């Protein structure tokens, strides 16, 4: 089935999906590009070295969001496909794709649970901080059947360096105080869509091994940059998170943004913050 037909089909069907909480990242997509911290510059080269991504294969990015990983890897594969159930995320992914004049990326609205979707097989299938949002056992079994011979599944995570973070010109964002402000508005328990008290699931390695994978092979991608972030950047980063997505605040969103802005002004006279980026890590699973 041509990708365009699959794309249209699942844009029409997603509203009836029983497994996806449509409110999970409600309103957050517009804040991703500005608010989320970038991946390490060496990420595409790490894929080329560890996965022999020489520009001729196919990549599937599961839970792609606004294409943060999908669009970074378009040079390493002949074709990249991102799937995500959130329409706002896909609109942003397509906007960025078109803005960058990328021609080998397709985005499809569908949850991981609906795979394989007639998409064919792939050399690499990625999960960038998305595996915990889905039926992990089902997704792992399905993607195992979608890999070409010699293919691999790759989880992409951030990992903190040992010791102190490099000092920057400005103070770091006041993460503790931001968290306290979010709790004042939303309550003590972590929110995630319609869920209250969300806890990230564990035992991921058991899930992958039960699905027939071996590993993981770990590839560390260092990132020693210190970025300067404005107050608006930090606000965008806060609103890009599922636990503080815009929809959770309802009519109080303008009040929250004003209080957050005041908090950040008090934390930095210049209105700027220094953020030491974390390293990235590839967790490579092979059948």
Image (cartoon, grey):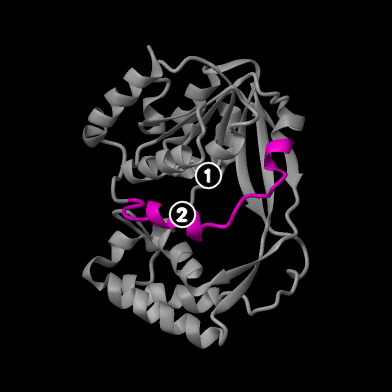
User: In the shown orientation, is residue 41 left or right of residue 260?
Assistant: right
Q: Is the C-beta separation of discs 1 and 2 under 8 Å?
A: yes
Q: What element carries label 2?
A: helix
**Does 271 sit left or right of 284 as displayed?**
left
What is the quadrant of the C terminus in the image?
top right
Give the residue at x 42% y 79%. 261
What residue appears at the point 69 percent right and 33 percent down from the top-left corner?
47
Q: Is the residue 209 above or below the residue 264 in the image?
A: above
Snapshot quadrant of residue 93: top left
Image position of 51 with respect to 162: above or below: above
Give yes or no for residue 43 being in the magenta stretch: yes
Q: Where does the image place residue 233, in percent across and percent down from the top left? A: 50, 67
Q: Distance between the residues labelled 1 and 2?
A: 9 Å
Query: In the drawing, does residue 11 fall left or right of residue 219?
Result: left
Other residues around mark 1 within 10 Å, as few (<14) / some (14–19) / many (≥20): some
| Rendered residue at 21%/33% (across/down) | 16
Tell me the residue that label 2 is attached to: 32
First in sequence: mark 1 vs mark 2: 2
- 142 relative position to 76: left or right: left
The correct choice, above or below, for 152 with respect to 275 in the image is: above
Q: Which one is nearer the viewer's eye here, 196 or 20?
A: 20
Residue at horizontal 42%, vertical 20%?
116
* Magenta highlight on residue 111: no
Q: Is residue 87 above or below residue 265?
A: above
Disc number for residue 214: none
User: Does residue 32 show up?
Assistant: yes
- State which region is magenta: 24-45
**Which dot marks residue 68?**
1
Quarter containing the N terminus:
top left
């Amino acid at each position: 089935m041509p990708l365009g037909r699959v794309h249209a089909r699942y844009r029409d069907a997603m509203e009836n999906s029983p497994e996806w909480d449509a409110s999970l990242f409600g309103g957050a997509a517009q804040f991703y590009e500005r608010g989320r911290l970038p991946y390490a510059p060496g990420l595409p080269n790490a894929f080329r070295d560890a996965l022999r991504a020489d520009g001729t294969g196919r990549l599937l990015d599961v839970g792609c969001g606004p294409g943060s990983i999908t669009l970074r890897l378009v040079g390493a594969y002949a074709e990249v496909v991102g799937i995500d159930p959130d329409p706002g995320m896909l609109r942003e992914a397509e906007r960025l794709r078109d803005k960058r004049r990328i021609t080998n990326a397709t985005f499809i609205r569908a949850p991981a649970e609906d795979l394989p979707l007639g998409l064919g097989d792939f050399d690499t299938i990625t999960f960038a901080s998305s595996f915990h949002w889905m039926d992990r056992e089902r997704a792992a079994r399905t993607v195992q059947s979608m890999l070409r011979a010699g293919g691999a599944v790759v989880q992409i995570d951030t990992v903190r360096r040992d010791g102190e973070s490099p000092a920057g010109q400005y103070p770091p964002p006041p993460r503790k105080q931001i968290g306290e402000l979010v709790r004042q508005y939303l309550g003590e328990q972590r929110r995630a869509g319609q869920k209250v008290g969300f806890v990230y699931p564990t035992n991921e390695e058991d899930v992958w091994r039960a699905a027939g994978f071996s590993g993981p092979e770990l590839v560390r991608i260092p990132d020693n940059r210190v970025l300067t972030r404005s107050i608006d950047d930090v606000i965008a980063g806060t609103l890009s998170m599922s636990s503080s997505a815009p929809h959770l605040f309802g009519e109080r969103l303008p009040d929250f943004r004003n209080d957050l802005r005041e908090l950040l002004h008090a934390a930095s006279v210049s209105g700027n913050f220094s953020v030491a980026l974390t390293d990235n890590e590839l967790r490579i699973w092979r059948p």
